Amino acid sequence: MQLFTVDMALVRRYLDSPVLTGTDAARLLELHGISDGTPVFLDDETMMPVEPLCAWGRSMSYADLAEGTMKDYGRIMARFDAHQAKRDRSVLMATEADLVAYKKSRTQLQEKPIGSSAWSKESSILDQFFAFAVEQNYLRRRPVRVASRGRNALSSRTRRGMDIRHLSLEQYRYFRDVGLGGQGPDSRLNRSYRGSSPHRDRAGADLAVCSGMRWQEWATVLLPELGMGVDHPGDETEFTIQACAKYGKTRGVFLPEQAVRAVETYCLLERPEFTATAARRLERRHRELFVVSRVEPETGRVHGTLDGVRQVFVMQAMPPKLRRITVWEGEFGLEAMAVFLGRGGLMPGADSWKRYRHAAWRRMVALADETTPRLPAKRWRWHDLRHTYALQLLTYLERQMDGAEPDLVARRRRHRSYLSGRIRYNPLLIVSRRLGHSSPETTYAYLEYTDDLVHEYEAAFAGWLGDPAEEATYAQIASRAFQLEQPAGAC
């Protein structure tokens, strides 16, 4: 069996058939509600659709799942189909024994076994598929028996909480300046550095640690959202994210002055080289791109041409895939509207940012000496900066409300009191809203970590960004958070 995914842009561009044009095929997909990313499973020999897998893929498209999510789910089912093929069985012929064998192969026997969280995702998708097969009468019953407390053969044996990993101020500066910025531990330029974009990577880290945005949120920011290219950016900026946020949940983002300056530095020193090098390439590809002709800063709308059709989008509603191909006329010709660019002149993808942080980690380890702060036990992740933001802001807000209270039990009791009383100014709920959590219970897990003395007291809000002489503080961020929580007309 072969797995493909729907991509209407490719269909329009490359389908050339005497029976059906690419435009007609894309129109049919839209008519039937088939979205980009929908998995399509075809037989190896006949290249005909394999059911019920294709029907299951369509059901995900009708459920309006994200493109990347449908691709991931499709790969999981294709992997299980390959496992079944080795056992001379189809997916619909799966028994409980087949599922147990698949679980062991993924979590124990393969060269790099997956962890409990990854297996939980796979088992959930398999459960969903077999439930769909029963509902649509492809099967009489699911192949897995449900035991007590809802457990079955696919269940993970481990239950883990949030993997909260955060950085101290010294760790962050070492990671940003040495790992990403090409400096040595003594803050001098290290000539062994072979990276090409230290200012870009440092600016990305500063945006993440001062805003709490997830990787897909800060890495896809557009210049007009920061006031750049349409107006001179101010000392600080605020904008709204939605399509790039998890579950499409709308929330406001505040960036302090020093974070905006870090982006300005990158835009002055490195970004022009990317845009000049890629201008001709983008000009040749202009039919594949969303070419913006006008930006309305006051409304957040952008006007342009996509696939030969005039289009208008609201920036906060633009998904990452559209943002990646959004360009406008710049100094050297067409240039991407995204803040962060790669060598191809467009927004770097997940693999590129993963490569940047892996290279930074290798540098951090290689250059570590007696002056180096204690490195994390595990290789750092971009998401660690979001955890750091949450812990630093939560700790600061707690102290502003009630002062330092080292007793964990007392603090938990105090937060329960806030939930029924001063809800609007509850530090936990403020941070929860700033992070875009669906439930305060998710943010509640951070309380256990605010007692960590290694990360709590040493200059927690004295300058994570910028130069020591002009440092942004979490106090500035917290002050803005309080303002954003106030109702209209409040003093």
Image (tube, rainbow, N blue to C red):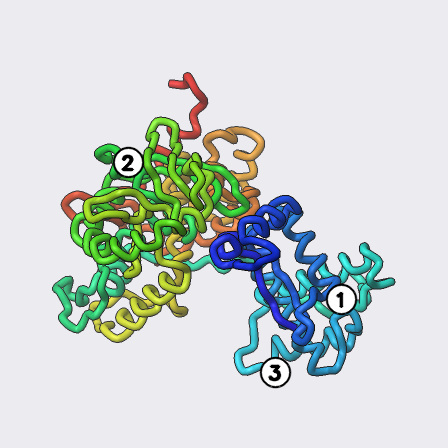
Disc 1 to disc 3, C-alpha distance: 20 Å
Of callouts 1 and 3, which one flags the residue occurring earlier in the amino acid sequence? 3
Disc 2 to disc 1, C-alpha distance: 53 Å
Dot 1 amino acid type:
Asn
| Quarter holding residue 167 | bottom left
Disc 1 vs disc 3: Cβ atoms closer than 8 Å?
no
Q: Nearer the viewer, mark 3 or mark 2?
A: 2
Q: Secondary structure at mark 3?
A: helix
Dot 3 amino acid type:
Leu
Q: Residues within 10 Å of mark 1 (few under 14, many from 20)?
A: some
Disc 3 to disc 2, C-alpha distance: 52 Å
Q: Nearer the viewer, residue 151 or 285?
A: 285
Q: Where is 192 relative to 11, above or below? A: below
Q: Where is 82 relative to 183, above or below? A: below
Identify the residue at horizontal 67%, vertical 76% (top origin).
45
Dot 2 amino acid type:
Gly
Q: Residues within 10 Å of mark 3 (few under 14, many from 20)?
A: few
Identify the residue at horizontal 23%, vertical 56% (top origin).
274
Q: Which residue is mark 1?
A: 152
* Spot occupied by residue 325 in the image (x, y as percentages of width and height): 39, 50
* Spot occupied by residue 128 in the image (x, y as percentages of width and height): 71, 58
Question: Could one spot residue 239 in this view of the protein?
Answer: yes
Question: Could one spot residue 205 in this view of the protein?
Answer: no
Residue 227's label in the rendered image is: 2
Of callouts 3 and 2, which one flags the residue occurring earlier in the amino acid sequence? 3
Q: Quadrant of the C terminus?
A: top left
